[in-house]
Amino acid sequence: MASVVGALLGVGGGLQPAGAAHGAHCSWTFVIVLSPGFSMEGSTGTHRSEKPGALQCEGAVNGRPITGAGTVSDEGPYGTEDPDSCMSGSEGTGIDRITVQTAEGTQEIVSEFTYTAAKLSNGGPFRGEFKGTRLDGAIELRVLEGDCVTSPITKVEVKGQGVLHD
């Protein structure tokens, strides 16, 4: 988150995009499903968008001015370096699939990414950063399903801000 995600996260509360330099400045929101999900015990698994989320960008992409809203979705593995848990944080990889509207038509972009996220903090959101081949940014995940203690966290809202590079 995008992605979390990339992937597994979202943005809000004043997070700043990583490497906010040249390119289109974007924000997005979508829901990610985690399988098997985060709990107190470490696990590896997958993250994927429930459906494409809303993407708003200002600037240009592929040399074309952006004229309207787009979409973003992502998928990939989590726990790629070691098993992830609510107490350890998360890392992983994935692919963002992005569409952006321009005067010349829809631009479709694929951005492979890696991400890291801090551990869950007193029921607060996970926060993290991701770096992709086309999209970099900051993310924040808000838990929608699960509580990490009695049931694994299996669904999160991702909010993100970042830069879509040519």
Image: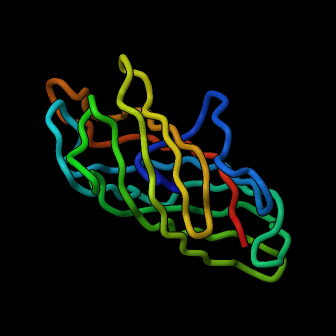
Q: Residue 62: where, in percent of width, then height?
A: 76, 78
Q: Residue 126: where, in percent of width, then height?
A: 43, 33
Residue drawn 22% across and 52% down? 35
Q: Is residue 139 above or below residue 54?
A: above
Q: Quadrant of residue 93?
A: bottom left
Quadrant of image for the C terminus? bottom right
Residue placed furthest toward the front: 81
Q: Tell me if 96 is positioned left or right of 98 in this view.
A: left
Q: How many marks?
A: 0
Q: Quadrant of residue 39?
A: top left
Q: Residue 9: where, in percent of width, then height?
A: 45, 43
Q: Tell me if 139 is positioned left or right of 114 in this view.
A: right
Describe the colour scheme in one phrase.
rainbow
Q: Residue 4: where, in percent of width, then height?
A: 46, 51
Residue drawn 39% across and 50% down? 32
Residue drawn 45% across and 68% down? 95
Residue placed furthest toward the bottom: 104
Q: 93 or 108: nearer the eye?
A: 93
Q: Is residue 106 above or below residue 27?
A: below
Residue drawn 48% across and 63% down? 113
